[in-house]
Amino acid sequence: MNFGDTLKKIRTDKGQTQAKLSEGILARNHLSQVENNNYIPAYDKFFLLLDRLNVTFEEFLSVQNDSKILFSRKLRSQISEAANLADTEALNDLSIEACELYEKTDNITYYHSMLICKALIAYNADLTINQDMIEFVSPIKEYLFSMDNWYLYELKLFNNIIYALTVEEALLFSRTSLKRLDNFQYFLEFRHIEQHIYTNLSTLCLEHRDFEVAKRFAEIAIEKAAKYTLVYEKICSELNYAIACIKLTGDESAYEVIEQNMLIIRYLKFDDLHEHFSSFLRKFEIEMSAQKVSE
């Protein structure tokens, strides 16, 4: 479907006339030329038209591609879901799929997806930052370092490899990425990326046993999750926060936080995630009531 055909389809589906859509943006006859594929509007005019139609650019592209979601985005979404649930089997399947797609298309996003899957699998093996994991993300680090500026794709990539950086690298690039992220604060993806950066930073600091900084980042992550009503993310952030508190002061109330959140994870049947955090607790030598945690 051509550019103009797509715009016309959305307009008619929304029941808008050319006169109503074009008013105050461009002349009606110009809109007619756009819909007949004889004229391309300036990008600012185009986005004003989309805004009046209450359609996102991604949704416009989806309609233009005959309502098929761009597969690279779908794959990244599946990887994110598998990573959140610590589902190693799903990550392995997605790694194979991404590798096959990269060989067919030479699209670098599939290559990055494959590397992220392999790195996550290496980490989930024993919940330890290891050399295999670091080697898998090295090409992604090189790609990011070669960019003069980051957009949402690069910000997501950075988020995915925080755990494989040194604390110094992560803190340095987090400051840069959070400033850059402000440019996208009105995008729906903003809230997830921002919150995940803080959660991932807290996890990284836990890995390096910098519990004070881990606690600080987890606290911010909890605030962001509450602000954006991100329930799943709030659970993970609260677990990180509780672990840091126990390692710092032996805070008894933190044990209750862990028990409550582990029960919620079990209730939601996130079995792989439950096992992930159970292993994480053992790693930090935090002993819980076996009955309460596994109920």
Image (cartoon, rainbow, N blue to C red):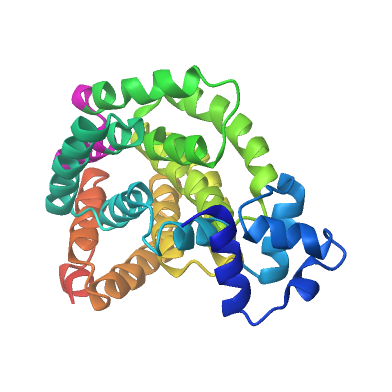
The percent coordinates of residue 164 (x first, y second) are 34, 29
**Would you place residue 149 above or below residue 49 in this image?**
above
Q: Is residue 173 magenta?
A: no
Closer to us: 127 or 34: 34
Instruction: Name which quarter of the figure residue 19 lies in.
Output: bottom right
Please identify the dominant SS of the magenta region.
helix
Residue 105 percent coordinates (x, y): 26, 34
Above or below for 123 versus 227 = above
Q: How many marks?
A: 0
Looking at the rendered image, the quarter that the C terminus falls into is bottom left
Give, as a single range, the part of the protein colored magenta.
114-132
Q: Which residue sits furthest bottom? A: 15
Relative to residue 205, is residue 282 drawn left or right?
left
The percent position of residue 179, horizontal first and vertical second, equals 67, 36
- In the rendered structure, the answer to whether residue 287 lies left or right of residue 256 reads left
Q: Nearer the viewer, residue 109 or 120?
A: 109
Question: In this orientation, which residue lies closer to the viewer: 154 or 135?
Answer: 154
Residue shown at 25% from the left, 49% from the top: 280
* Residue 123 is a magenta residue: yes
Please name whichever residue, 253 or 111, is drawn nearer the observer in this view of the structure. Answer: 111
The answer to which image quadrant residue 163 occupies is top left
| Residue displayed at 53% across by 52% down | 195
Residue 75, given in percent of the width and then of the height, sits at: 30, 50
